[in-house]
Image (cartoon, rainbow, N blue to C red):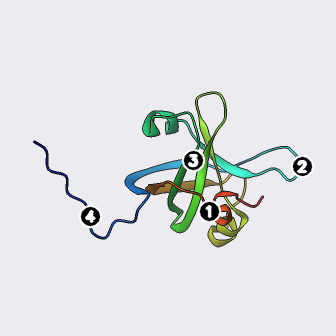
Amino acid sequence: MSIVTTDPHAKPGVEPVDVSFDVVLEKSPAPGGWTYVVWPRSAEFFGTHGLVKVAGTIDGEPFQGSFMALGDGRHKLAVTAKVRRAIGKEEGASVRVHLTARRSGRSASQDDPPR
């Protein structure tokens, strides 16, 4: 027999996580390309090579976004212009990413990052 307890304050579709890592902001060379970070451990951590929706902070600035598969076993996470302005960093700068939640569901305004 197992007993399952739930947090009465937990949001539906959100799985708490607590992991931090330091990475360098990269930018696609394509015209209008995204600025992003690559976390080499993402597939291992999340157990998938597919899309993973997350929330957390980048250098203390809150964000919601998605890790997108690169096709080589790694994922990239777009860093929006809004977040980059707030932290004052661009391509080549080191940032600290702290993931606090794995999300499900879809919100176009949160998951389709502007370039």
Name the spot of residue 113 as percent of width and height, x first. Answer: 70, 59
Residue bearing the label numbered 3: 23
Which of the two discs, 3 and 4, labels the residue nearer the N terminus?
4
Instruction: Characterize the local packing of mark 2: few (<14), some (14-19) or many (20 or more) Cα atoms within 10 angstroms.
Output: few
x and y, in percent, of residue 103 in the image: 48, 55
Q: Position of residue 10 (x, y in %)?
A: 34, 65
As shown in the figure, which amino acid type bears the numbered disc 1? Ser
Q: Residue at x 51, y 63 (%)?
A: 57
For the residue pair 21 and 11, the one nearer the viewer reads as 11
Task: Identify residue for label 1.
Answer: 107
Q: Earlier in the sequence, mark 1 or mark 3?
A: 3
Residue appearing at x 64%, y 66% in the figure: 83
Label 2, on which residue?
Answer: 31
| Image quarter of residue 88 | bottom right
Give whichever of discs 3 and 2 has the lower sequence position: 3
Residue 107 higher or lower than 48, as above or below: below
Crowding at label 3, few (<14), some or many (≥20) Cα neighbours within 10 Å? some
Earlier-in-chain disc, 4 versus 2: 4
Label 2 residue SS: loop
Q: Is residue 58 above or below residue 22?
A: below
Which residue of the protein is positioned furthest toward the top in this rendering? Answer: 72
Q: Give the structural element (helix, strand or loop) at label 1.
A: loop
* Local crowd size for mark 1, using a 10 Å CA cut-off: few (<14), some (14–19), many (≥20): few
Check disc 3 and report its element: helix, strand or loop: strand
